[in-house]
Image (spheres, rainbow, N blue to C red):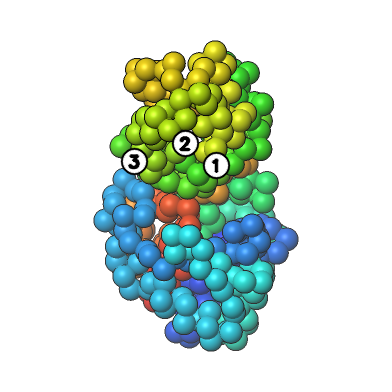
Amino acid sequence: MSKVDVIIIGAGASGLFCAIEAARRGRQVVVLDHAASPGRKILASGGGRCNFSNYEVAPGHFLSANPHFCKSALSRYNQWNFLELIKEYKIRFTEREHGQLFCEQSASEILAMLLDQCQKSGVRIFTRQTITDVKRSEEGEFVVTANQSCYVATSLVIASGGLAMSNLGATDLGYTLAKKFGHTIISTRPGLVPLTFSASDKEILTPLTGIAIKATVTCRKESFTENLLFTHRGLSGPVILQISNYWQPGDPITIDLLPGCDLLEGLKVAQKAHPQRQLKSVLNEHLPKRLVLALLSDELISRPLQSLSYADFAVVQRHLQQWTLRPAGNEGYKSAEVTMGGVNTGEVSSKTMESRKVAGLYFVGEVLDVTGWLGGYNLQWAWSSGWCAGQYV
C-alpha cells in the first residue's frame, strides 16, 4: 500500500497540469494511466503540432449545460499564463487563423515540458495501470487498486477524459467513477466531428470527395465560416467540426458556398457585360466545376446569361448560398476530437473543481460537461481546470 496526498487518474493535459500544481504546493502526487505512455492526446493535437491555446479565449467559446461554470477557471489561469510557461521553455509557436496557437516544431515539445515540470516537482507517473477498484475508506480516504497495487490518498482527481479519439484508448472510466460517487452525467455525444451523408445525398455528392472550399455553415442559429471538405462519407473540415457541436440528429444545416459574395448582383453584372457567356463559365470562376455540376442542372448552367431571368438567378443563388442538407449522422467517437456532455457541473465547485457531493473528489478537463470550440480552447480548458484543482487538492 502506497500512501500519498493526491491520486490523479489520467495522465493527459488536465491531469498532468493538476499534478504539477499540486506538487508545487508540497503535495505528494501519483498519476495513474492505462496507456503505455502519458499525453497521447497532446501528441495527436493539431495534427502533431499541438494547438495548445488561443489568443482569444472567452466563456462564449465553450458549451455546457451551465455556461457560467467555466468563467472562474478561465479567468484565474488564462492563455497568457500558459504562454509564460511556453516562453520559459523557449518553445517556438505560431498563430494561425482565429488566434489559434500551434507549436512551430512538434507537440512533443509541450509534452516534454509537462513531464519535465512533473519530474522537477516530484510527481510520480505510472502507466499501463488497469484500475480495478476505487473506494472510500471508513476514514474518508480514497483507496485505488491498480495492477494489484494499492494507493491511498485524501484527494482523488478524475482526469480520465471522455470518449473521443477512441483509437487512442479513450474509455468511460471517468463517468463510471463519477456515477459511483453519486454524480449525474449530462448525456454524452461526439463533438468536433465530421458529419455523414444520407444514402441519397451520398450517391450525388461522393464524386465531390477531395474538394475543399471556404464556406459558411449554419445550424440552430449558430454560424461558422471556415474551410469545408467533402469526403467519401460526408462533410468535414474546420467549419463542419465547429457546427457539429451544435448539430443534433435530424437537424438540417445550411451552407453558403460563396461567403461574403452577393451572387445575385454579380450575375446581373455579368449578364450585362457578357450576355453570351454560359452560366457555368461564370460560376466556374468561383467554384470547382464538379461542385457546380452536382448542385445545379446541366440544362440550367449551359444556358447563356442573356437567356436567364432574375428568377433563374435566384434559383442559382439559393442552391449555392442557401444549400440545405440534412446529415444522416456523424462519424462517431473514433473521429471526434472531444466529447460533448459529461459530469454535471452543477455538482462541482467552479472555483476548486471539487465535488459538492464527496469531499476530496475532484474533476478536471474533458470528463466535465464543458466543451470548447475547435482552435485550442479544449486544451486551454485542460490547463485552466487542472491548475485550479491543483491549488486545492
Give the alpha-carbon distance from disc 2 to disc 1, as whole Å: 7 Å
Within-10-Å neighbours for mark 3: few <14, some 14–19, many 20+: few
The residue at the point 46 percent across, 25 percent down is: 275
- The front one of 184 and 337 is 337
Q: Does 144 appear above or below 334?
A: below
> Residue 123 location, x and y as percent?
59, 78
Closer to the N terminus: mark 1 or mark 3? 1
**Residue hosting label 2:** 257
Indicate the amino acid at tag 2.
Leu
Residue 139: in sight, yes or no?
Answer: no
> Dot 1: what SS?
strand
> Residue 233 location, x and y as percent?
63, 30
Residue 207 lies in quadrant: top right
Give the alpha-carbon distance from disc 3 to disc 2, as whole Å: 16 Å
Indicate the amino acid at tag 3.
Glu
Indicate the amino acid at tag 1.
Ile
Residue 87: in sight, yes or no?
Answer: yes
The residue at the point 29 percent across, 62 percent down is: 71
**Residue hosting label 1:** 213
